[in-house]
Amino acid sequence: MKTNLIFLIPLLPLLGALFNLFLGRVIWRVAAGRDPSRRVVHFVAVGTVVASFAVALSLLVGPLFELFWKWHQGGKSGLSEALTQSVYTWIEVGNLKLDLAFRMDTLSGVMVMVVTFVGSLIHLYSTGYMADEPRYAAYFGYLNLFTGAMLILVLGDNLPVMFIGWEGVGLCSYLLIGFWFENNQFAYAGRKAFVVNRIGDFAFLIGMFLLFQAVGGLDYETLRSDAAMAAYRSPLWGERLAFWAGLFLFIGACGKSAQIPLYVWLPDAMAGPTPVSALIHAATMVTAGVYMVARMSFLYASSTAAMAVVAGVGALTALFAAIMAFAQTDFKKVLAYSTVSQLGFMFVGVGVGAYVAGIFHLVTHAFFKAGLFLAAGSVMHAMSGSGDIVKMGGLKKWLPWTHKTFVAYWLAICGIIPFAGFFSKDEILAGAWSAEGQGWLVGYGELLWVVLTVAALGTAFYMSRLYCLVFEGECRADDETRSHIHESPWSMTVPLAILAVFSVGIGFIGLPHVGGLPNVLESWLSASIARPDFHSTYPSIAESLHLSAQNHLGEGGLLLFMAIALVMGIAGIGAAWKLYRKGPSKLVADKSASGFAARIYQVVYNKFYVDELYDRIVVAPFRWACQALFDVVDKFVIDLIFVNGSAFVVGVVGRVARWVQNGQVHRYLGLLVVGAGCIFYFTREPTIDFSYTVSGGRVTFQADIGAGPSAIMSKTTELRWDFNGDGDSNDPEEQRFRNKTEAQLPIADVGSQVTLWYTDPVFKSTAKTVKPVDKNSDRVGGEQ
Amino acid sequence: MASAWVLPTILGLPLIGAILVMLIPRSEAGLARGFGFGFSLATFCISLAILGYFDSEYGRFQLVVDKEWIPGLNAHFKVGVDGISLWLVILTTFTTPIAILSAYRAVDKHVREFIAAMLILEVGMLGAFVALDMFLFYIFWEVMLIPMYFLIGIWGGKRRIYASIKFVIYTMAGSLLMLVAIFYMYAKHGAITGEYTTDFVALQKNLVLSSEAQFWCFAAFGLAFAIKVPLFPLHTWLPDAHVEAPTAGSVILAGLLLKFGIYGFIRFAMPMFPAGSQAWAPLLAILAVVGIIYGAYVAFAQPDVKKLVAYSSVSHLGFCVLGVFAMTAMGIEGSIYAMLSHGLTTGGLFLAIGVLYERRHTRRLAEFGGLWKQMPVFAGIFLIITLGSAGLPGLSGFIGEFLTIFGTFVASDASIPVPRLLAALAATGVIFGAVYLLYMFQKMMFGPITHEANRTLKDLSGREIAVFLPIVAMVFFMGIYPRPFLKSMEPAVERFMTTYHTKLAQTRDQTYVPGVSPKQARAAESSNPGALVPRLQPAVAASAPAAVAPPADAQAAALQAVAKRATAPPVAVDQAPAPPVAVDQTAGPPVATKIDPQTRVAGVKGALR
């Protein structure tokens, strides 16, 4: 259904950015002679995002819900219609036509709600958190710009428009990570994020090109048409096209969503202000990859191999990052690795075809992880900016609101019923176990399940460790810091409270299929993404994949899985409680101080030395190659040897010529003599040739004395002919024509071959030439 | 025609300006600056009239003026624009006043000569973009060189003499061979048609050289253009010229002069010598990709910002070359678009470096750091231009890069070898671009202030903001709404591709051995991709097919030989009059002849081996 309001959703925050970064300053400077006040800045910033949320909500509950309901009542066949708007044609070249078009369907609707709602809360929170920031307007400008770009990413109706948002959010991430750019390390972290993302974006571009070449369009309607679905299964480089296209797009997602091997930028990204970490590096931007895979569900569902890669990378990342989170001592670093790990969970969800579960976890994670970060901000705000959890402890008595809300987020991420994370994580686990597809390795789904269960146990452990170290036990901070601990202002606690409510409640939109409970989210999302009953969604790929957690497990199985997950969560909490309840216990301190465990601890603490490894194998060789290319190839080979070398040769020749041509006549004369001598010497060998003409019974011979000084200088020409072929020149006829260059005689007197001798008059050396004569008809011959 | 006045006016105005400026007393520097800026701005305003007269639906040359010029040579003063040159002309008139304005304070010796040189330079560039006569083009091409030589040599830095001589000799070396090729075409056209002319349109229409002649002519033109681009490994004059040139000179050099390389390929070398282009394309495409990556790598190693940006041009222009030789609409239009964007962003970067150089008299990265705090407005502008250069979607650089890589990716492997691999390698330039540009930005803008001298830096003045504002606005506009630009290019690019393929077909129909008609040859080739089938001389085949046709078994033997790819040595016949060309200059827009590049191309390559 065409509508003309969607463009407002991304436009409003972008206008806010325009105001705060540029227009506002110009207008205020001209009108009032100063910059806009903080009140104006945050009114515009928060206002535009809230307005965008309002527009999105009105579209969602109005026309979008209508479409959904029509589809729902109509037997859920195929996919539901979407709200679309084409603003203008962006690029049109040859057969490539890209509109700046937006699409709001049930999937992007969910994303838009998350982005604008969580975004609004974080904008509000920022007004308190960043109150003392001198570059207040710039901060909010970037934040608005980010929101706008993220909404373009989510709402874009074709891949290139998504790519605008995709790189746009990367830019804002760069600017906000390096917001306090006076610290070189922060600025470097921003650059690292951008460059690593660019590596992913490079692959994303290639994926797009492959799709366009196969399908002939890049908008989602074209990409999921029947013709496209057939093209996806065409072979390419030993696999299906869908595999390669999906793989390249997924590498892009690995960059944006911080998956192995491109996750390294996210922990460093914590250099940015904490609300930024909450919004960009937890709730929204980093989930873009998950959204993209769900958006392209039809593509991934066409290649089991691509799905296996997505799920495998997701599971590995989930486990690996969870382990790294064990040893971190910085509040935000723990949360960062936790985010990487949770994103891994989501990728397993979308990778095994449980798209709904993946998106569901994305939604719940957005709330509780944003909450965790905001709580971290609140704690650090209280602790004079320090995030070292070793120096915290017992904060629950100073920060009651932060503590209470934190408990909700913590239990949600640990997967304790009925908090939101429990439901979403459980659905992913169930989906992994029952995943099964054409060409899917036997036991692969089960293996994914085992890895994720271990990762979930780890999650519960490190989050509980974090909770204990921060809020339980005695305060380990110095007195100076302790005297300043205070609860945050309302602008920060209110968003915390709202997020806490959602962390408890949002799970109920995706209840498991037990006892006839409704899964609202599944019905809603099924209207726009591939789902277990592929037959009605994408008939053409029905045979390649059969996925349905619920169908395979049954109620009993689901309950068993939920119980296992719950036990894992409780076990993790229990272990951490035991070890860290009163600060790091003696056991932990001893083990991490020496022995084998300490060595492992060091490795984990240093994040498996992955950053150092990348420095060695990527960054350092790159720098070396740059310098070497410049010094050796550019400066030496090309410029010195070829360019200046050829100039040098010309110069040398010129200098020699200048020495020679110095205007002294005797030198010129001398050279003249030498030159003439050379000419004589090299042309001293005489040459001789003749031609003949046969005509009217007579043969005419014409001698041709070779060029050269001897021929020119001689007055007498010594020529001897042998016409009859007897080997000498003594016959009368031959005597007659001695020293004649031209000879004419009857054809009868001419033998089968003719010889001509020529003696050089100067050097007295003799040359001869022998030629057969063809006397048959009128002809000219003898030319060599 | 009512529109005929426009092109002569924009050519004449800067020329008159230059003459008038030289009449101003030496002491009146301010007046000279004002005159220069005024004339170049007026030229820009008038050049906008081209947009008004220009019909975007139309692929042919418009606003054409054709006057007799040198009767003895039959050279004409013939100028006109089409969708390919239109925006480059506007870019020229747009950039020149900005460059002059930027030099208000930087240039304080020989001001009126400087202004005159800039204006003459503008005349040369505009002339070369609009010239439709080969001889006229060559004259303008050389006219550009002289003022640039003085700009570097007089107002340049320490090694200015070295740099200016290197620049001139390098460029001259290329263009002399081009002159030889122009004369060759002139003579050939005269021999074939009896009419000696240097009219580009006539040459392109009537002159179908043998593939061997095309090979060498393309090489002669191509060398001149490749040096100008500059294509790796002919690029080393560029960093030297940039580093020594004054800011305004660098802006013109990077923003405009380099474009003539690409423009020359599209306008002259490729449509006139398609067979030569086919033969050289693989090498040029590979060099372009090498240049993209190499330029980025070497840029990263530079301690001097200006040199860094200079090497980034090598990288960026590589995209343009690659896009052109991909021979897809996306590639070519992307290439032109990338040129426009590069003119804006790289010109802008040089202006920004100039701003800093005026204040600090250094361009070493290590001397800066933390400037954002001191110069926030400058930093914001610098960031936008840097990101535009790095190809961020929504800014101008993205469209060109995206389209050239895209166009290369979907190119036929008859145009360039392994198009997808080349595109992927070129796309890594996107990564490296971010690496060196953000490195530069961080070193200059971020971090603490480490040099005391940087603490007192003043932010941009009103004049400086006026210099940057149009550039920043265009960087945004071209990124957000590229359609009008692309739309007006499209017909001309379509036409270019049609001409190219038509002429390619004619070239191959000329190469013959007795016994095989072009039709049979084409049929044999389509069943044997990659084989060259020699052709029967067209005139003979057409006039008396029955009488001249050799026995059937001879034909069969010839075709069989082809099937084994054992081709007889082809004989060129450019003595024979060329058959009428499908593309007519005077009739309406040509109907695009569908030519399958796959079958078209292979033969020519064979012919050249």
Image (tube, rainbow, N blue to C red):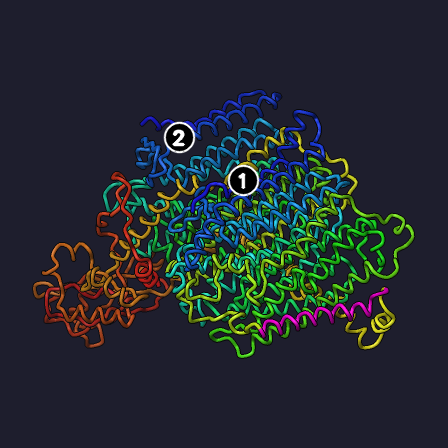
Name the element at disc 2: helix
Q: Is residue A6 left or right of residue A567?
A: left
| Closer mark to the observer between disc 1 and disc 2 | 1
Amino acid type of the residue tagged 2 in the rendering: Gly
Which of the 4 image quarters holds residue A507? bottom right
Disc ID at residue A594: none
> From which residue to which does the magenta span run?
A556-582
**Residue under circle 2?**
B52
Q: Earlier in the sequence, mark 1 or mark 2?
A: 2
* Mark 2 surroundings: few (<14), some (14-19) or many (≥20) residues within 10 A: few
Q: Could you say which is closer to the camera, residue A538 or residue A417?
A: A417
List x then y, in percent, for residue A347: 58, 64
Name the element at disc 1: helix
**Residue under circle 1?**
B476
List x then y, in percent, for residue B195: 25, 41
Q: Are marks 1 and 2 on the same chain?
A: yes
